Image (tube, helix red, strand yellow):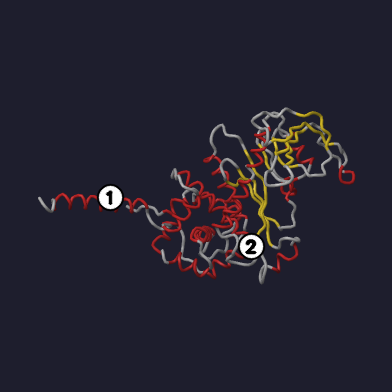
């Protein structure tokens, strides 16, 4: 009886029928000529998991495992065909697939009764040189030429739950305003999302936020809140404040007229403390500070995915290829996260990825059976041989 490989076990989180419905919605396999979206997805996920450095390495490595292609529902790769597919095929197929996996991972990894903590941030990816300059130079900023990945990240589950890919000159707050706010959730973001009316929208949707005030924020202090002995030394001030300026920035009306909270937190490694802003008037000041500290989780995610998956060097240089490679990196991360949960794996995701890279096409059940047989044979042999000095 055939036992599935580790690669197939990981891909079980994305049923073929579900993916085919996404492809059908976008009519993406029209004129595919024998190399469909599923073949492309398998090839790109293999590239991410194996760390293939080029199309030639990808082609050689994947095609060397020809006995596995049938069971994956895939075909051998020709690098020219894959390059053409990445250049021309609709990115919406992979974007929608990532969304489906984000939803599935969020349900399977969330623990009942746990606080809904969402972290919001973006990270730019530098793209310069022949092939890149033609479409990145016109939208560059002073610091970055390339592309920007925006994420809403579930902090407790450590998975992205919403994504978008834009030019680097798109402001973070423009993407933030497009979020559907979930009641009772906590949203944590930095000063790049400073828009008082958007904060007011979050407040009106019965959600909470934690962010930072800008240094020039015009505020009036209504009252100071007591600081517990436990928080003393960490929390310097805890105050209920209001915005003093109702018409900031040339006549734009500020709708946030209700009280909010300013928590001043000491930073031993900086001269200036953190000035945290929140509409949570109930939680302890140390809880507010911890929530903002949790924002580091999304920074670690960006660092992890850039170090361990392929979104810094690319197999193609046009915009379509770059977007598909970034999307398949997100898909790969989600597949690994779901697999880790299903296997009750106790190690880190990086160690799991290292193991997967070394054993991607091994069949764990077969290997376990071979090991059991060897142990039984050794036991029987030792019993028949007897002791040397008996």
61 to 350, vertically: above or below: below
322 to 80, vertically: above or below: above
Q: Secondary structure at mark 1?
A: helix
Q: Which residue is mark 2?
A: 320
**Residue 34: % across, % down:** 50, 64
Q: Residue at x 25, y 51 (%)?
A: 375
User: Which residue in the rendered view is the most extreme toward the left?
Assistant: 390
Which comes before the other along the chain, label 2 or label 1? 2
Q: Which residue is mark 1?
A: 372
Q: Residue at x 51, y 47 (%)?
A: 337
**Residue 36 versus residue 309: which sits nearer the camera?**
309
Mark 1 surroundings within 10 Å by alpha-carbon count, few (fewer than 14), some (14 through 19), many (20 or more): few
**Residue 175: % across, % down:** 72, 49
User: Which residue in the rendered view is the most extreme toward the right?
Assistant: 251
**Residue 317 versus residue 294: which sits nearer the camera?**
294
**Residue 283: % across, % down:** 67, 30
Corner quadrant of residue 295: top right
Measured Cα–Cα span from mark 2 to mark 1: 48 Å
Mark 2 surroundings within 10 Å by alpha-carbon count, few (fewer than 14), some (14 through 19), many (20 or more): some
As drawn, the label of residue 380 is none
Figure label count: 2
Corner quadrant of residue 240: top right
Corner quadrant of residue 239: top right
**Residue 323 versus residue 259: which sits nearer the camera?**
259
Q: Residue at x 55, y 50 (%)?
A: 21
């Amino acid at each position: 009886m055939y036992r599935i490989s580790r690669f197939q076990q990981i891909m079980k989180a994305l049923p073929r029928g579900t993916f085919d419905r996404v492809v059908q919605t976008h009519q993406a396999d029209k004129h595919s000529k024998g190399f469909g979206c599923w073949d492309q997805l398998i090839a790109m996920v293999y590239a991410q998991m194996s760390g293939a450095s080029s199309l030639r390495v990808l082609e050689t490595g994947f095609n060397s495992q020809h006995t596995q292609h049938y069971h994956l529902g895939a075909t051998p790769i020709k690098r020219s065909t894959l390059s053409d597919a990445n250049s021309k095929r609709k990115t919406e197929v992979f974007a929608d697939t990532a969304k489906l996996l984000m939803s599935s991972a969020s349900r399977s990894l969330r623990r009942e009764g746990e606080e809904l903590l969402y972290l919001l941030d973006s990270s730019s990816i530098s793209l310069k040189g022949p092939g890149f300059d033609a479409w990145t130079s016109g939208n560059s900023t002073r610091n970055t030429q390339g592309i920007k990945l925006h994420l809403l990240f579930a902090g407790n589950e450590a998975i992205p739950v919403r994504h978008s890919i834009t030019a680097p000159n798109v402001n973070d707050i423009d993407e933030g305003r497009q979020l559907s706010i979930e009641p009772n959730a906590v949203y944590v973001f930095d000063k790049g999302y400073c828009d008082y009316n958007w904060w007011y929208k979050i407040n009106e949707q019965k959600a909470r936020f934690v962010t930072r005030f800008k240094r020039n924020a015009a505020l009036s202090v209504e009252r100071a809140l007591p600081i517990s002995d436990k928080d003393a030394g960490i929390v310097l001030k805890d105050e209920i404040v209001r915005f003093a300026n109702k018409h900031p920035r040339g006549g734009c009306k500020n709708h946030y007229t209700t009280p909010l909270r300013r928590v001043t937190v000491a930073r031993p490694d900086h001269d200036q403390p953190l000035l945290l802003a929140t509409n949570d008037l109930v939680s302890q000041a140390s809880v507010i500070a911890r929530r903002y500290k949790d924002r580091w989780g999304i920074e670690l995610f960006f660092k992890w995915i850039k170090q361990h998956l392929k979104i810094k060097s690319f197999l193609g240089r046009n915009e379509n290829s770059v977007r598909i490679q970034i999307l398949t990196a997100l898909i790969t991360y989600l597949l690994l996260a779901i697999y880790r949960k299903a296997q009750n794996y106790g190690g880190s995701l990086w160690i799991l990825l290292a193991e997967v890279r070394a054993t991607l096409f091994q069949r764990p059940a077969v290997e376990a059976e071979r090991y059991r047989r060897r142990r039984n044979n050794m036991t029987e042999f030792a019993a028949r041989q007897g002791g040397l000095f008996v």
